[in-house]
Image (cartoon, helix red, strand yellow):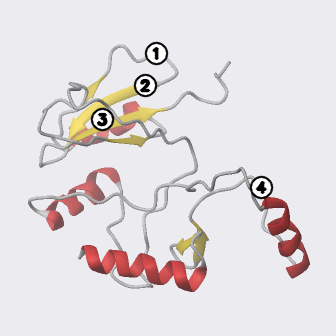
């Protein structure tokens, strides 16, 4: 299955350019940019020339293209993520939809090997999902019998909660600070 995913991503990248992935019914940009799409070939060339990095600039990734991990029951776990968190399963064909994230902040932060932040020391990763309404998401998960602990130290702007998937992998939910309340 991993080979199929990798092959699908490679084929999509070659066919459409590395910035594209299949959307629900058509091709869609994988990463949101501040620049609006150009409408003419001349505009596209001009925009490309403006974006060319200087000799000292470093190329950067544009976002997370996938999150892959081992599981005792991959199909069952994938169904759990789809049912409870709304994450569309990996596509098995070009016509199948993929999960599309909303544009927003993503934190990339390696932790020390000895961290207790993930809970179980045998777990080497934790995923953090952004949510619009932490209370509503927590209530939905709790109604399905999933234990969710909302962090009492969360302030009224940035709010966090913890849960575990059926295989004990830690998941953190994050309701980011509302742009209206940012200072």
Location of residue 68 in the rendering, given as x and y in whole percent from the top left corner: 29, 60
User: In whole angstroms, how far apart are the C-alphas of marks 2 and 3?
Assistant: 15 Å
Q: Nearer the viewer, residue 5 or 76?
A: 5
Q: Residue at x 30, y 35 (%)?
A: 139
Tag 1 near tag 2, CB within 8 Å:
yes
Helix or strand or loop: what does disc 2 sit on? Answer: strand
Identify residue for label 2: 159
Q: Residues within 10 Å of mark 4 (few under 14, many from 20)?
A: few
Mark number for residue 139? 3
Q: Secondary structure at mark 3?
A: helix
Gap in Å between the C-alphas at discs 4 and 2? Answer: 40 Å
- Residue 54 numbered tag: 4
Q: Earlier in the sequence, mark 1 or mark 4?
A: 4
Contact check, label 2 and label 3, Cβ < 8 Å: no
Q: The residue tagged with tag 1: helix, strand or loop?
A: loop
View extreme (left): residue: 72
Mark 4 or mark 3, earlier in chain: 4
What crowding class fits label 1: few (fewer than 14 Cα within 10 Å), some (14-19), or many (20 or more)?
few
Residue 98 found in image quarter:
bottom left
- x and y percentages locating residue 83 in the rendered image: 27, 57
Residue shown at 16% from the left, 40% from the top: 123
Q: CA gap, disc 1 to disc 4?
A: 42 Å
Q: Nearer the viewer, mark 1 or mark 4?
A: 4
Dot 2 or dot 3: first in sequence order is 3
Which mark sits nearer the N-terminus, 4 or 2?
4
Looking at the rendered structure, which numbered label has been put on residue 155? Answer: 1
Q: Nearer the viewer, mark 4 or mark 2?
A: 4
Please rate how many residues cluster around mark 3, counting C-alpha atoms within 10 Å: few if below 14, some from 14 to 19, many from 20.
Answer: some
Image quadrant holding the C terminus, namely top right
**Image x and y of residue 179, in percent:** 65, 30
**Which quarter of the picture shows residue 16?**
bottom right
């Amino acid at each position: 299955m991993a080979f199929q995913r990798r092959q699908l991503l490679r084929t999509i990248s070659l066919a459409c350019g590395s910035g594209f992935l299949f959307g629900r019914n058509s091709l869609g940009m994988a990463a949101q940019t501040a620049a609006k799409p150009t409408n003419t070939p001349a505009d596209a060339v001009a925009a490309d020339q403006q974006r060319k990095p200087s000799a000292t600039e470093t190329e950067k990734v544009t976002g997370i293209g996938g999150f892959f991990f081992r599981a005792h029951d991959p199909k069952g776990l994938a169904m759990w993520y789809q049912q409870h968190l709304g994450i569309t399963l990996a596509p098995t064909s070009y016509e199948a939809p993929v999960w599309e994230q909303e544009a927003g902040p993503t934190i990339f932060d390696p932790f020390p090997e000895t961290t207790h932040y993930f809970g179980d020391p045998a777990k080497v990763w934790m995923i953090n999902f952004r949510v619009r309404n932490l209370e509503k998401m927590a209530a939905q998960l709790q109604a399905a019998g999933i234990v969710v602990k909302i962090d009492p130290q969360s302030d009224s702007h940035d709010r966090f909660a913890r849960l575990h998937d059926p295989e004990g992998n830690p998941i953190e939910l994050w309701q980011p600070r509302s742009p209206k309340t940012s200072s």
